[in-house]
Amino acid sequence: MAPPHPRRPIAKDRFAALFPTLKVQTYQDPTSRGPGSHTIRTIAWNPTGHLIATGSADRTLRIWNPEKPQVKNSTELRGHTGGVERVAWNPTKEAELASVSSDGTCRFWDVRSKTCTATVQLGGEGLTIAWAADGSVVMVGRKDDTLIPITIHPAPTAQPSHAPALQTNQCTFNHTSPPTHLLLTRGDGSVTISSYPTLQTLHTLHAHTSSCLSLALSPTSRYLAIGGSDALISLYDTTDWVCKRTLTNLTGAVKSVGFSFDGSFVVGGSDEGNVLEVAHTESGEYVGKVDIGASGGCGVVAWHPGRYWIAWAGEGGGLKILGAAGGQL
């Protein structure tokens, strides 16, 4: 796999000056049948940033080329019989994708051949997915909060499940190879850091006053961002697990959160509001703003793995990528 070619990180002030020059490209799926029928629930960049996947409530799983917005240059992957809840790329393979669905399956895809290479039965509706940095294991969460590890080699195989006592909305592995920790958001406003593969709780962060919905570990592993239903993003230092700052400019529950490729900037997505705001990780200062219009917010956001591009999707608005249409940043 060819490595991504990141732009050189830039300072906060220069980022703030150049961010307004970025232009938005829209990618419209022709399968949309009207407002609400094609709500995109999940987006994810592949490791090189040459492709981006979207999964929708109407079972549509599509792979887009960000450089070519016409749908004829995209690929639709067919097989799920329920809404696609979450997608994740293998961090070590640019063309291998996994998707979980309310149809009770986790499917693995080769996007070059457009084929489903494996289907794993989950025993319940799928909700979340996280792929370990070394590509060795996928962690899938069901809507009943059961966690199912799926080992990848020699073929995707479900391992014994775990049933946490609390509601689990999202999870992510640490960045080591092989993974040693799994971080999970909880319905009581906490985040647990568990050992992997035992899932024994090592630390509990009492991060929010209401349910924690999303989390992201920065590429440098220095910070953990946690999004809550209280419309806040808390930023924790992973050295001592202390909350360093809280971002307060969001409107509505923070359903997704992510860092730029260098970890310098953070953004959150919510189904409410009409502005997407970017904050500087170290200072908490807001350094960029995008008017997303009256499309019902943007519940899912994702940074490009090597550029300061941001992809998002909202109710009825299709996929949009800030930076794909040009700009100086």
Image (tube, rainbow, N blue to C red):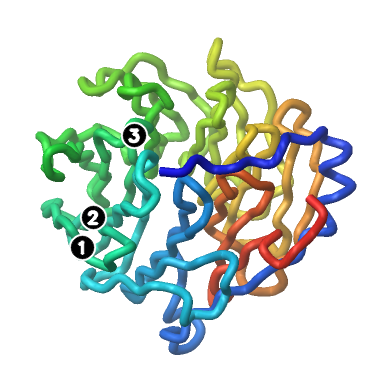
Residue at image mark 3? 132
**Distance of label 2 from label 1 (alpha carbons):** 6 Å
Q: Amino acid at mark 1?
A: Cys
Tell me the quarter of the picture where residue 152 sits: top left
Asked if the residue at tag 1 contacts the one at tag 2, i.e. Cβ–Cβ closer than 8 Å, the answer is: yes
13 vs 168, left or right, is: right
Q: Secondary structure at mark 1?
A: strand
Residue at coordinates 51% horizontally, 56% vertically from top-left? Answer: 50
Q: Residue at x 61, y 67 (%)?
A: 320
Q: CA gap, disc 3 to disc 2?
A: 15 Å
Whether residue 37 sits left or right of residue 228 in the image: it is left
Residue 59 in the image: x percent, y percent? 31, 73
Q: CA distance from mark 1 to mark 3?
A: 20 Å
The residue indicated by pointer 2 is: 108
Image quadrant in which you'd find residue 291: bottom right
Q: Amino acid at mark 2?
A: Phe
Q: Position of residue 128 (x, y in %)?
A: 33, 48
Q: Is 201 located above or below residue 88 in the figure? A: above
For residue 145, what is the image quadrant? top left
* Label whose residue precedes the other's in the sequence (2 or 1): 2
Of 163 and 188, nearer the camera is: 163
> Does residue 210 appear left or right of residue 328 in this picture?
left
For the residue labelled by badge 2, is the local secondary structure a helix, a strand or a loop? Answer: strand
- Label 1: few (<14), some (14–19) or many (≥20) C-alpha neighbours in 10 Å: some
- What residue is rendered at 87% in x and 40% in y? 14
* Depth check, front residue: 173 or 203: 173
**Relative to 81, residue 181 above or below:** above
Amino acid identity at mark 3: Ala
Q: Which residue is mark 1?
A: 116
Q: In this orientation, does residue 291 appear?
A: no
